[in-house]
Image: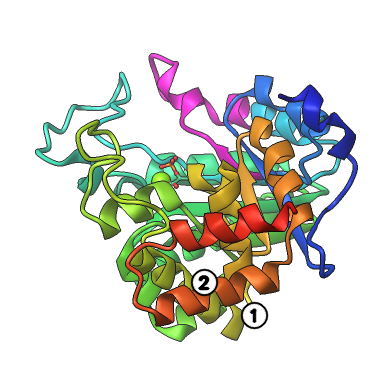
Amino acid sequence: AQKRYAGLRDLPATDKAGTTIQLYMNAGLMADLPSLDGSGAEGVGLFRTELQFLTRTRVPRRGELAALYAHVLDSAHGKPVTFRTLDIGSDKVLPYMKPQDEPNPAMGWRAIRVGLDKRGVLRMQLQALIRAAVGRPLLVMFPFITEMDEFEDAHRLLMEQLAREQRLGHAMPSDIRVGAMLETPSLAFAPQKFFEMCDFISVGGNDLKQFFFAADRENERVRRRYDTLNTSFILLLDQIVRRCNQARVPVSFCGEDAGRPIEAVTFAALGFRRLSMRPASIGPVKHLIRRVDLGGLRQVIDEAVARGETNLRRSVTEWLARQSH
Ligand code: PEP
Ligand code: MG
């Protein structure tokens, strides 16, 4: 499949009307980095940092992490890498963390909640990221932000670490951008000030969908029950894009659905200008974007919503099928 799209690698994901969608890749291992060039991704839209914590018997040391993050940045050859701070829950128990025995770990003490309650680890990770990015841009995003205050708190923690590094006389990253992952429905309704405070927002569609439909993403019986192109979910995404545009904050989509071509063009039609996905999905998604007029698809979506369709998949796929002739 990779070969089939190889010819597209160096071409932009530009639709027929000239709108370009930036395609980024998700990563979590050093071994993922070679795909950056191979896939034609413009950068890493989501670097999951959990693995380095999960594969050790103790908390990794700051120096170890800084070296690893620097290596990731080196291997990206100047393409942007967005690091997501530790998203650990009591389902992904660290060997050196006390098990929490929570009835609903996905809705439990996880991600930024742990980071803000047990600040030592988050502080250490932020210091490692700052040191890794000396002399180059640093992009950090915080997972599972549920209300504005959590973002403010995490942002402050990062600023404190920057001030500390400066006090210690260390060199600094050349630029710092701080973003939030929007993966709980409540954050879509945060005050407009929240959107203005972020340098960027990344929609974590896997979790956002799980919590929007109250359907466990790990539970085989329900995880495919609700369609991403369900009109209610699309209207939620539409509102998120609208609010981000109002605040002039760049918004991307980085859940698994960004790598599914039909979903991806739908998100692009809603106004997402950046999608982050598995490297192997970049070719197929780019191929489809280049064949359509996103404005035309937007109209199809609006009309289907106006007709009261509860699911947009049929309208979208029928329209897409007509585009190839
Ligand atoms: C998401 O929730 O969509 C996401 C990208 O994060 P993860 O899959 O790591 O929870
Ligand atoms: Mg998530």
Q: Mark 2: which amino acid?
A: Ile
Give residue 151's position: percent from left, percent from top: 43, 65
- Residue ID at (30%, 69%): 186
Q: Residues within 10 Å of mark 2 (few under 14, many from 20)?
A: many
Kindly identify which residue carries mark 2: 301
Kindly identify which residue carries mark 1: 248
Residue 221 visible to the viewer: yes
In the rendered structure, does residue 221 fall within the stretch colored magenta?
no
- Residue ID at (62%, 47%): 276
Q: Residues within 10 Å of mark 1 (few under 14, many from 20)?
A: some
Could you tell whether 288 is left or right of 191 in the image? right
Q: Bounds of the magenta span? A: 45-66
| Kind of element beneath mark 1 | loop
Above or below, 243 relative to 52: below
Residue 178 visible to the viewer: no
Residue closest to the eye, 83 or 106: 106
Give residue 33's position: percent from left, percent from top: 72, 27
Checking the image for residue 64, the label placed there is none
Above or below, 104 relative to 318: above
- Residue ID at (45%, 26%): 53
The quarter of the rendered structure image containing the C terminus is bottom right
Above or below, 227 relative to 47: below
Quarter location, residue 319:
bottom right
**CA separation, marks 2 and 1?**
24 Å
Q: Are marks 2 and 1 in contact (CB under 8 Å)?
A: no
Which badge, 2 or 1, comes first in the chain's sequence? 1
